């Protein structure tokens, strides 16, 4: 009787652990499908679905069970969840075109037929154009950002031009040439400040790989950035013009140990020989001054002395007497 009751019991489908943490409204891609980015979008979507163990839904191997099959309820639940992932990873215009598809496999087939091979030649041309015109200076990017810019375009090109099209013995040769070509393209667009480094990389035998070349240039950029950050900024340090203006306005400073006149507070003479206190000494100074270039102050004194009157010998006797009195 127990066996009979068990046979008559309704089988309740078990929840799939790979789907239990994700509702149909869950967005699973970093970019939304807009009709132009199918390669990048499909790559992201396939990785997520494959990570949940549901790649067979995209490969078309997950067949729909009959209505009376006990597995039908589980199939319907998974189908609705994956459809939700599809719809919530599309822009509204794309969603409106495909919203009435009932099964995930038919929706995936429709998307691949419409977008996977649409305008490939135009997109490939656009990608090659982006790469050939790429310049770190023009784009205003750091070395790492510039490298990422190229990487994203190389990766998309690989989707359109897969190596699987080549025989196995040829594919390895193509990979090596492609890697070397990527290194050339990376070095071509660097700022001119890295010219010496990229010449060094090209002259190294064997030539470093793409990632080794990137690590070298990126490390140099980081080193220079640290050096610049350790230096005081120009705005914080006084300019040369400001320093010259300050020196001119503050006037000369008497060096330590020099003779200072306590009458005019200038250096180089005492009070007894101060021209301001004893103007009659100017002519004597001009007559005995050393040859060669002198300061502007000396030239000014000479100019004034040139217009002074000549002194008689009796004047010098009187001058010597006055000097003697001052020194007492």
Image: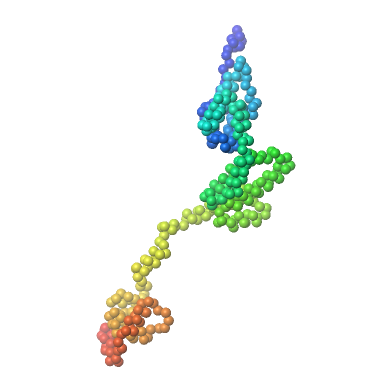
Residue 255's spot in the image, x, y percent?
37, 73
Q: Where in the figure is residue 303, as x and y percent of width and height?
A: 34, 81
Residue closest to the eye, 51 or 272: 51
Q: Residue at x 57, y 47 (%)?
A: 147
The residue at 60%/31% (across/down) is: 111
Q: Is residue 326 above or below residue 41?
A: below
Give the residue displayed 60% in from the left and 55% down from the top: 198
| Residue 245 left/right relative to 61 | left
Q: Which residue in the rendered view is the most extreme toward the bottom?
A: 313
Using the rendered image of the protein, determine whether residue 21 is visible from the camera's viewpoint.
no
Q: Position of residue 232 (x, y in %)?
A: 44, 57
In the rendered view of the protein, which quadrant contains the C terminus?
Answer: bottom left
Q: Can residue 133 be seen from the camera position used here? A: yes
Quadrant assignment for the N terminus: top right
Q: How many marks?
A: 0
| Vertical relation: 113 (above or below) 205 | above
Residue 167: horizontal and vertical position, in percent?
73, 40
Viewer-proximal residue, 121 or 195?
A: 121
**Residue sitting nearer the eye, 98 or 103:** 98
The residue lying at 70 percent from left, 39 percent from top is 165
Image check: 273 left or right of 211? left
Quarter holding residue 2: top right
Coloring scheme used:
rainbow
Toward the top, the furthest residue is 1
**In the image, is residue 19 above or below residue 197?**
above
């Amino acid at each position: 009787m127990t066996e009979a009751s068990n046979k008559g019991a309704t089988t309740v489908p078990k929840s799939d652990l790979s789907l239990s943490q994700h509702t149909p409204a869950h967005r699973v891609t970093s970019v939304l499908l807009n009709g132009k980015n199918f390669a990048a979008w499909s790559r992201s979507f396939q990785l997520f679905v494959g990570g949940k163990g549901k790649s067979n839904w995209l490969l078309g191997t997950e067949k729909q069970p009959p209505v009376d099959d006990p597995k039908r309820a589980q199939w319907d639940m998974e189908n609705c969840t994956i459809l939700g992932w599809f719809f919530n990873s599309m822009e509204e215009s794309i969603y409106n075109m495909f919203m009435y598809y009932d099964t995930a496999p038919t929706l995936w087939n429709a998307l691949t037929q419409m977008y996977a091979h649409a305008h490939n030649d135009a997109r490939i041309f656009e990608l090659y154009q982006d790469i050939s015109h790429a310049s770190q200076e023009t784009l205003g990017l750091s070395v790492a950002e510039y490298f990422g810019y190229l990487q994203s375009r190389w990766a998309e090109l690989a989707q359109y031009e897969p190596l699987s099209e080549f025989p196995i013995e040829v594919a390895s040769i193509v990979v090596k040439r492609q890697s070397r070509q990527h290194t050339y393209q990376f070095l071509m667009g660097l700022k001119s400040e890295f010219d010496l480094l990229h010449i060094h990389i090209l002259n190294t035998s064997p030539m470093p790989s793409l990632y080794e070349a990137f690590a070298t240039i990126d490390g140099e950029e980081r080193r220079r950035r640290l050096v610049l950050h350790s230096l005081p900024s120009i705005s914080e340090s006084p300019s040369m013009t400001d320093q010259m203006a300050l020196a001119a306005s503050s006037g000369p400073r008497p060096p330590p140990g020099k003779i200072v006149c306590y009458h005019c507070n200038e250096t180089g003479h005492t009070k007894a020989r101060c021209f301001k206190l004893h103007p009659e000494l100017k002519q004597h100074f001009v007559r005995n001054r050393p040859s060669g270039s002198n300061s502007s102050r000396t030239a000014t004194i000479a100019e004034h002395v040139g217009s002074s009157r000549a002194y008689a010998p009796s004047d010098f006797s009187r001058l010597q007497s006055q000097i003697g009195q001052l020194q007492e």
